[in-house]
Amino acid sequence: MNELGQAKQAIEKHPVAAQASKDRFRRLTIAEAGIVLLKEHGQLHGKELERLLKDGGLRSKAENFQSTMVIAFRRNNDFQNIGGNTWRLKEPGSIAGGGANGTETSAYFISDTIPRKISENT
């Protein structure tokens, strides 16, 4: 096939690939899509995360998308803000995280939430 035919074939395939990438995050939560992106890129700034999430088809009615994104990331506990609104995934087994200085803890102990029976001996 000549160069013109190959170029035409690539152009015909491109809209399908573009459509697939625009639907990529359509059925995912912000946190789920963020995990996908950070696994691919390692770390990203909040503005870049926002752009990639929206370009990937993530829909949100939030007036301030980045604030919503930060809340979703903090609730998930898989994310770490390393400073300057730059995010990465926490290392497996890490219990400290949250802010850039690691002051927040993501450890959750089930025993703290189970009501305990108070015995008469105590």
Image (cartoon, rainbow, N blue to C red):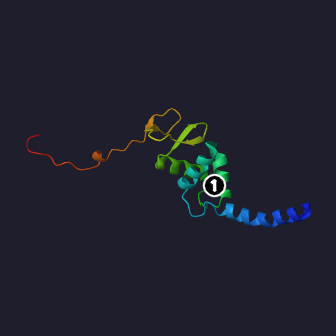
Q: Could you say which is closer to the camera, residue 44 or residue 7?
A: 7
Residue annotated with mark 1: 53
Q: Amino acid at mark 1?
A: Leu
Quadrant position of the N terminus in the picture: bottom right
Quadrant position of the C terminus in the picture: top left
**Residue at the farthest top position:** 101
Which residue is painted at 45% across and 38% down in the image? Answer: 94
**Residue at the farthest left position:** 121
Query: Relative to residue 1, is residue 93 drawn left or right?
Result: left
Q: Could you say which is closer to the camera, residue 90 or residue 46?
A: 90
Which residue is painted at 29% across and 48% down in the image? Answer: 113
Which residue is painted at 47% across and 46% down in the image? Answer: 77
Which residue is painted at 11% across and 45% down in the image? Answer: 119
Measured from the top left, where is residue 25 in percent x and y?
61, 60
Quadrant of residue 9 in the image?
bottom right
Quadrant of residue 10 in the image?
bottom right
Secondary element at tag 1:
helix
